[in-house]
Amino acid sequence: MRTEGHVQVALVIDQIGDGGAGHTVLKLAGGLASVGVHPVIITLSDRAKHEVDPSIRVICAKPSPISLPVLRRRHAAREIRRLLVTQAPGGDLEKLPTIAFLRDAHRACVAARIPASSLYLSIRTSIIGDLNCKRGRKRRRLQSWFTGLLSGRNVIACSKGLLEEIERLGIRPRTQRAIYNPYDVEKIRAMASEEAEGVPEEPFLLHIGRDHAQKRHDFLLEAFKAVPTPARLVLMGNHGPRLREMIEAHDLTDRVQQVGYRSNPYPWIRRARGVVCSSDFEGFPNVLVEALIVGTPCVSTDCPTGPAEILAGTEVSRLVQVGDTGELMRSMEQLLRSGERETSAPILGHVRTEIIVGEYLRVIGLGDGTQPAPSTTPADQL
């Protein structure tokens, strides 16, 4: 599909950091540009880890001179509105489809009074998973915040499981649609064939993720310690001293290798015996899809949300119960012993960039270049 003419779409995000959301925004922007739609990325921070295509316009909001959170959020809202008005045709925000990614961007766009008809909130992680991290009054306050944020607004969830959570919580968006993250399959496979320094020669399992309680490195290390087959566990990502202390506490310094952020992790993914996701909750974990693209099997917790959708129909990959150390250990051991590659991955037929871009354009009303698309389903008709 090709959309003719110069059409602006604004993508608002906290920052283009090393997380999956920043990666997704860049891939979406590139995909939009490839079909003649001219996107602009607006960030609340100038922090950037991913390489940005110079053909994609990125504007960073001016930082707040005040550190007080309430005033900083007000400043962010004013900045976002100011920048969007400069990009909108004739300064009319209803004519500028705006997709906001991550919580600070959601908050800023809502506070900036972006019209509900042109604002789309992209939900990237399990709401119930977030709520389960809280107790008592804090949990009730967070649930109330989510309800107020999403009710009556256009919601784009990165997995079907997220839409099910929204319905289970009784939240009633204006419209809602699940759209997976975009992946350039051929490019990922080409990058996976490149040489990379430091990749272990011996069999290894790979975990990619930041040092955060949600990722459950403690659970992963406990299970890996019980794996009898000689092998290495590689932990890739930006990690603090807490994780090193955890590795030492499990007496795994000789078996676990920490490596930092890699702009091209795909050679590591391709050469791993398996990719492991040990999280308590996710949204739509990119690393599982990227592993399947290069034929590497996965072991993942069957956490909310994403892994069950991604690994459905695979032949070698496995889902394990959250927190079941024995099941995770046995699944990792099986991957190490078999050395099998993953040859079946039905999800790959639904996540190519050109497919995802087409879905976004239909949802934001640019599917035929002029008319709003009927594929954005009102919540009361779901």
Image (cartoon, rainbow, N blue to C red):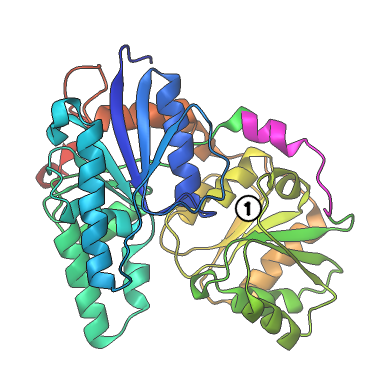
Residue 233 pos. (x, y %): 76, 66
Q: Secondary structure at mark 1?
A: loop
The structure residue drawn at horizontal position 21% and vertical position 61%, both measured from the top left corner, is 74
**Residue at image coords 49%, 55%:** 307
Does residue 141 appear to the left or right of 305 in the view shown?
A: left
The residue identified by callout 1 is 317
- Can you see residue 169? no
The quadrant where residue 224 appears: bottom right
Direction from residue 331 to residue 194 in the image, left or right: right
Residue projecting furthest to the right: 201
Quadrant position of the C terminus in the picture: top left
- Which quadrant would the N terminus be assigned to in this image? top left
Which image quadrant is residue 306 in? bottom left
Residue drawn at x 74%, y 49% as measured from the top left: 268
Mark 1 is surrounded, within 10 Å at the Cα level, by few (under 14), some (14 to 19) or many (20 or more) other residues, namely many
The magenta segment is 187-199
